[in-house]
Amino acid sequence: MTSPQWNHLLAVLRGEVSRPLPVAFIIDCPWLPNWHGVTIAEYLASETLWLEAHRHALATFPDVWFLPGFWSEFGMCTEPSAFGTRCQFPRNEFPYAHPIITDVAQIDSLVRPDPATDGLLPFMLNRLRWAEPQIKALGHEIKFSVSRGPLNVATFLMGTSEFLVALKTDPEAMHRLLRLITDFLQRWHALQRATFPTIDGIFLLDDIVGFLGEADFVEFGLPYLQELYAPDVAVKFFHNDAACAQSLKYYADLGINLYNPGIQTPLAELRRLSDHRLTILGTIPPRDVLALGQPAEVRAAVQQLLAATPDRSRLILSCAGGMSPGVPTDNIRAFCDAAREFSA
């Protein structure tokens, strides 16, 4: 993000209202490579193509905030790779991390990875080190440390169904696994902050939070997220586009001040459940409207959202969740035009 964008974001988090409202999107390998005209594998493997894709997005949509901004990633393989999972990289499909835990007894043999040397993490940092001068030349800075959350990483190591079942059948073992993952993630975020002093935000993505009931979230999610959001940074950004009604009331107390939800809960209800303590990044349907709709339908969805939201504080217009594959340029332009027209 640029310094003016960052300062604007901080103002929104404080509850200040700007006209028109800001527009922001989470972009990464599900959308950006194919929109840019390259395959996912080419995007992930080439530092130059990766940087060109981000430059292309900035040039095409200069008024949009792209979050977290110049995201260096290898899809869902990023953090699991440090634990030794087998990673698949199809030419133009999403990367896939194969589970490595087939029995809970294996958890105690896992070694905490070193993010400076293990898996794909050094390549992520090296990509950003290489790109940082060019990012700064564009007027931007690296502002977020980024990772999947502990529950999400656990499901890639075990399998989603297997992990969720084990929360009930082997809760102590799952706490040991989550303790190991959380310690690793704390070191990973600390390394990112130490490498890039411009970082002043944490971005965690953990959809598995939405698969837990309230009691299970309080036991298996809340304490580990609380530790990860403990560092003193200005922006504490959370993405969970699965169900959130059962856990949302806890987010602000974790320190989270920016939240990207899914489509399950209307904006008014999100605000009620969170006591309007969170800035919401959303909430236009990403697939059915932004990807599959026509520009007129995108425009109408933005207009409808704003008409139902007289209180425009702590709101950044976006889709519910990250940018879906296949979202066309014309639909993003229609979104931005509607935001300018109906929130001015």
Image: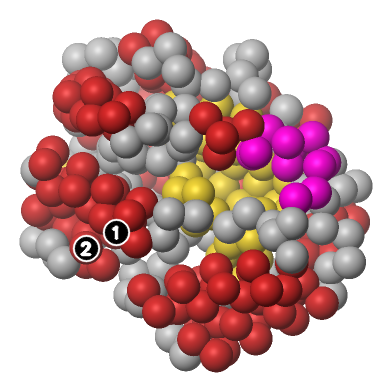
Residue found 41% across the figure and 68% down from its top? 324
Q: Tell me the quarter of the picture where residue 301 sits.
A: bottom right
Between residue 165 and residue 313, name the one nearer to us: 313
Give the SS element for disc 2.
helix
Q: Tell me the quarter of the picture where residue 48 sits.
A: top left
Residue found 24% across the figure and 23% down from its top? 133
Query: Alpha carbon of mark 1 to alpha carbon of mark 2: how far?
Result: 6 Å
Q: Where residue 305 sits: x, y (%)?
A: 74, 74
Q: Is residue 297 visible?
A: yes
Give the residue at the far top of this rendering: 194
Q: Where residue 180 sits: x, y (%)?
A: 44, 20
Q: On the rendered image, what quadrant is the C terminus found in?
A: bottom right
Give the SS element for disc 1.
helix
Q: Are the two marked residues, 1 and 2, in contact with CB atoms closer than 8 angstroms? A: yes
The magenta segment: 8-18
Q: Tell me the quarter of the picture where residue 251 sits.
A: top right
Between residue 306 and residue 263, name the one nearer to us: 306
Q: Which colour assignment does the render follow?
A: secondary structure
Q: Is residue 263 visible?
A: no
**Where does label 1 land, which residue?**
32
Q: Where residue 59 sits: x, y (%)?
A: 33, 55
Between residue 344 and residue 72, name the one nearer to us: 344
Rendered view: 284 above or below 124: below
**Where does label 2 land, which residue?**
36
Q: Amino acid at mark 1?
A: Leu
Residue 183 part of the magenta-drawn span: no
Residue found 23% across the figure and 52% down from its top? 53
Disc 2: CA contacts within 10 A as few (<14), some (14-19) or many (>=20): some
Q: Amino acid at mark 2?
A: His
Residue found 72% across the figure and 74% down from its top? 342
Q: Where residue 236 sits: x, y (%)?
A: 63, 31
